[in-house]
Image (cartoon, grey):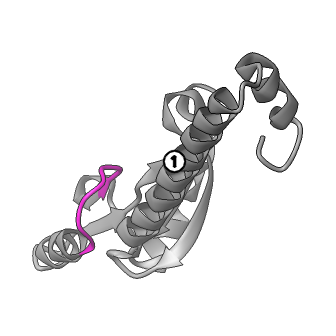
């Protein structure tokens, strides 16, 4: 039986090795830790549409499922440290999307397009 007082969870972003170190340190004290970074930002949090990358002991993650479901959905992705790696990969995609949007805006402007209309037109397509 798990006792909440013996559980630590982290939604912060850190190096995967740190998540593994934390897991080992708390296990040495007969406690549990889960690595659960989230994606969705402040809007996702407000609208309860966060994605949770849950890593650590599968039984502990399952036990915490009702808590995670309040925030939306979680995906169990593996051992400690994996949550951080998933979040880093997620942020790479976010950064690439922002760069693509920036390049598209610069091109549209330099091509003499009405940038406002361009943004409205691409919103409904694959770029939206």
Residue numbers of the magenta segment: 9-16
Q: Is residue 13 magenta?
A: yes
Quarter-of-image position of residue 80: bottom left
Q: Position of 73 compared to 37: left or right? A: right
Q: Position of 19 compared to 75: left or right? A: left
Q: Is residue 115 visible?
A: yes
Relative to 31, say whether 44 is above or below.
Answer: above
Task: Give percent across and percent down for residue 59.
Answer: 48, 76
Q: Position of 10 compared to 126: left or right? A: left
| Residue for badge 1 | 99
Task: Give percent across and percent down for residue 95.
Answer: 47, 51
Q: Residues within 10 Å of mark 1 (few under 14, many from 20)?
A: few
Residue shown at 30%/54% (left/top)?
Answer: 13
Relative to 2, say whether 122 is above or below.
Answer: above
Task: Give percent across and percent down for residue 106.
Answer: 58, 34
Q: Is residue 64 visible?
A: no
């Amino acid at each position: 039986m798990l006792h909440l007082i013996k559980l630590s969870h982290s939604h912060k972003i850190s190096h995967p090795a740190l998540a593994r170190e934390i897991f080992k340190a708390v296990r040495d004290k007969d406690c549990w830790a889960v690595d659960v970074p989230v994606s969705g930002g402040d809007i996702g949090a407000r609208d309860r549409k966060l994605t949770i990358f849950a890593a650590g002991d599968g039984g502990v993650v399952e036990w915490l499922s009702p808590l995670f479901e309040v925030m939306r959905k979680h995906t169990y992705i593996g051992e400690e440290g994996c949550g951080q790696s998933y979040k880093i990969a997620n942020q790479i995609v976010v950064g690439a999307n922002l760069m693509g949007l920036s390049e598209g805006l610069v091109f549209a402007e330099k091509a003499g397009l009405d940038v406002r209309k361009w943004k409205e037109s691409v919103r409904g397509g694959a770029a939206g």
